[in-house]
Image (cartoon, rainbow, N blue to C red):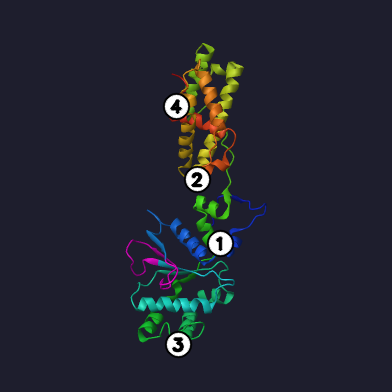
Amino acid sequence: MESNKKYIQKVNSVIYPPASLVILFDDKQWESFIEDCCRVDMGIGKKYSFVQMLGGAGDAGRDIEARYQEELKANEWDLYQGKHLTQPVGESTLYPELAKVIHHISIGTYPEPKNYYLCAPRNTTPKLHDLLAKPEELKKRFINAWENGKSGIKKSHFPFSDKTKSIANSFDYRKIKEFPVKDLIALHSKDSIAHEKLFGISAVRSDNPDIPDIPTTLEQVYINELMKVYSEHGNQVFDIKNIMHYENYKNHLIGCRTEFYSAEGLKRFSRDIYPSEFEKLLCSVHQGIMRTLANPTYNNSFQRLENTLEKAATLQITDNPLSKRLLPADLPGTCHHLVNEEKIKWTK
């Protein structure tokens, strides 16, 4: 299923689709990519509970083993076969691998999988693509090739014994499915951080939310704290209504609300694309402004507010995936979010 998120990519000022980049992978990188795709579907409430890359000598035809439960049981796991070739996968590539799988099922290396996914950056040949849609015809051609040692099958490695013949005949060839490279890439893109790291594709940040004319309950805590700052500075009691009659304070409040909603836009972007990273950003900002906030030489709370917001604006955040999405008002805006969460205060 295609993701509805928007992404941008820039590599040497030229856009390269991931479907083109995966062609440059080597065998191990391709298998690792497939494993990462499977791991997107691993975890509580997801498809898989265990995923392991086994590709290499002794893999018994399993490049990636993905189990529905911890124990390996018949029809409770999927086998992913990765083939990184310079041409589409055809019968002569599939059949030797399939013979290996049938052989290892027959000798008890592992039970029968629920699905056998064929994964290749150039997908399959038109002929094999059509055969996969005709499992009975595929079965006949495969068994004939094995019996006669054709299509790349070495009977010296995988003898067509009575037991393997029985399993080959009873095997449900509807289980053999092509996993198109675009579907693999779409699955991989659900892990936004890994997808960006691998392909240089960045999720596009949406516009910041509109600022309502009247502050909402979402803003109550930091707005009340600002009113205390203005009241102290102006030597009179301000609230959200009468502050609008004082041009300087009104404009300052508008600026603070703009910063808050800029950071709110970043928060919403993070929630959808990089869960928990906004909270980590708040922690980094909190640590970065702590000394400025605690400076005992301020004459009033307004100085504390202004100096802290200026300090936040200059912080260099490099260890957070949101750092590349920061807008000028975001870091000062995180200060208002920290006030809103009652982690800092402007007034004593």
Quarter of the rendering containing residue 84: bottom right
Residue type beneath disc 2: Asp
- Residue that mark 3 sits on: 147
Where residue 168 appears, x then y in whole percent? 40, 81
Q: Is residue 64 magenta?
A: yes
Mark 4 and mark 3 lie on one chain; the one further toward the N terminus is 3
Q: Earlier in the sequence, mark 4 or mark 2?
A: 2
Residue density around tag 4, few if under 14, some if 14–19, many if 20 or more, within 10 Å: some
Badge 4 vs badge 3, beta-carbon distance below 8 Å: no
Q: Secondary structure at mark 4?
A: loop
Q: Secondary structure at mark 3?
A: helix
Stretch of the chain drawn in magenta: 54-77
Residue at figure coordinates x 52%, y 54% from the top left: 189
Tag shown at residue 123: none
Percent of width and height locating residue 263: 53, 35
Residue 111 rendering spot, x and y as whole percentages: 35, 72
Marks 4 & 2, CB-CB < 8 Å contact: no
Q: Amino acid at mark 1?
A: Lys
Q: Nearer the viewer, mark 1 or mark 4?
A: 4
Residue named by callout 2: 272
Q: Quadrant of residue 165?
A: bottom left
